[in-house]
Amino acid sequence: VHGSARESYADLTSITRHIHKLAPESTIYTSDAGTFSGWLDRYVRFNRPGTFLGPISGAMGYGLPAAIAAKLHKPDQPVVSFSGDGGFLMTGAEIETAVREQTPLVALAFDNQKYATIEVHQERHYPGRPIATGLGPVDFAEFASSLGGRGYTIRHESEFPDAFADALKSDEPCVLDIKTDPEQISVNDDVIPQ
């Protein structure tokens, strides 16, 4: 699926390239299952053993709890979690756990207001008829703040580098609510037959 006009959305390719440039080599990455993970796989390099943790069975909601566990296990290494908005809605309240346990980490919530993976499967079998895949607007930055963490809203990739660098240096859990194009579903342009 080709992305729509991105005047108010952050481009996933640019975001993940910034992550690759800005995050220290020792960074531990955790990931939920979701369409956003294609960008992580393509543009972020894992150069050390034990620096990528992902679900084996495609479970949503894995990224943030895994990031908390990774940070508790390796407190001197930066930890960055990747989640779609659907996955983050499942376990995002664990930011409170990270705050309580004094576990600084960076949680990236890629917010396209839908369960994109489910929609892709529906489109393959029932073109033009996705159902129950939409999500309403959620302010994940404000949500993080309400739980005692720090939140950032990213609407364009140019806003990302400073926010990400600040979050990496923070001594508290940070959530970057990255508003992404609902039509930019895959790093590949041909996920859904036209």
Image (cartoon, grey):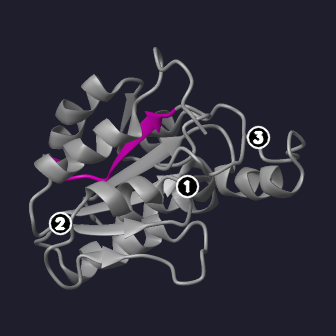
Label 2 – label 1 distance at C-alpha: 22 Å
The nearer-to-camera label among 2 and 1 is: 1
Q: Residue at x 46, y 49 (%)?
A: 187
What secondary structure is found at the residue carrying circle 3? loop
Q: Position of residue 166 (x, y in %)?
A: 17, 39
The stretch in magenta equals: 170-180
Where is 67 relative to 14, above or below?
Answer: below
What secondary structure is found at the residue carrying circle 1? loop
Q: Position of residue 168 (x, y in %)?
A: 17, 50
Is residue 148 inside the magenta stretch? no
Quadrant showing the C terminus: top right
Q: Is residue 39 left or right of residue 32?
A: left
Q: Which residue is mark 1?
A: 35
The nearer-to-camera label among 1 and 3 is: 1
Q: Which residue is mark 3?
A: 134
The disc labelled 3 sits on which kind of residue? Gly
The disc labelled 2 sits on which kind of residue? Thr
